[in-house]
Amino acid sequence: MFRSTLGRALVLGFIAAIASIGIVAATPGSSAVGTILSVGTLPAGTKVHTDDLKLTTRDDVQVVTQTITIAPGGHTGWHSHPGPVFVTISAGTMTFYDADDPTCTPGTYATGDSFVDRGGGHIHIARNEGAVNLVIYATYLVPVGASIRTDVPDPGTCQF
């Protein structure tokens, strides 16, 4: 019985150690709370072609709308998305850093600003470097069943 229990404990300890390495390597957010507002599906073959926009879905696409509130000093952690994300800043100012920028030059977006994150594995972090809550509305276009976000390790390009 002792060997069996000890063996199980060692195996479970090893699994926990390996799992914690993965957790430590990722950069989870801090003081950021997301709330899913809606989830829907655009069917394959959806076409929207106007003078200002062209959108065609080859396969079914899941559409997820979320609000994210980040307290002053908080951040999203380094992450990426599998598809494009339409972002609008509802309150505060967002400071945005790209992992592929060796100079770590911030982009800032204030209340009322919108932009599109290209997705496709583009690694970035959003930070609230202001004094008031940052409120973001994000609409994700992702493959059906996919996660809207993938946490990734700190790329080491920014020293904060």
Image (tube, helix red, strand yellow):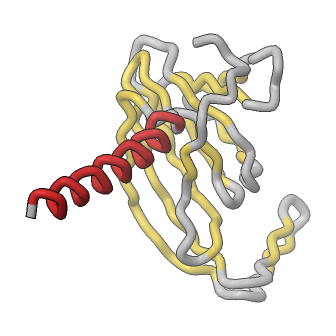
Q: Nearer the viewer, residue 116 or 152?
A: 152
Q: Quadrant of the C terminus?
A: top right
Q: Could you tell whether 38 is left or right of 108 in the image? A: left
- Rendering coords of residue 58 (x, y %): 79, 82
Residue 20, image x and y in percent?
A: 40, 41
Image quadrant assignment for residue 5: bottom left
Q: Compare residues 60 and 145 and report the one nearer the observer.
A: 145
Q: Is residue 68 above or below residue 128?
A: below
Q: Relative to residue 60, is residue 132 depicted above or below?
A: above
Q: Nearer the viewer, residue 93 or 8?
A: 8
Apparent side of residue 11 relative to residue 147 in the rendered image (left or right): left
Give me the residue at 59% from left, 35% from top.
153
Residue 132, quarter of picture: top left
Q: Residue at x 77, y 79 (%)?
A: 57
As drawn, 78 above or below 22: above
Q: Is residue 20 left or right of residue 3?
A: right
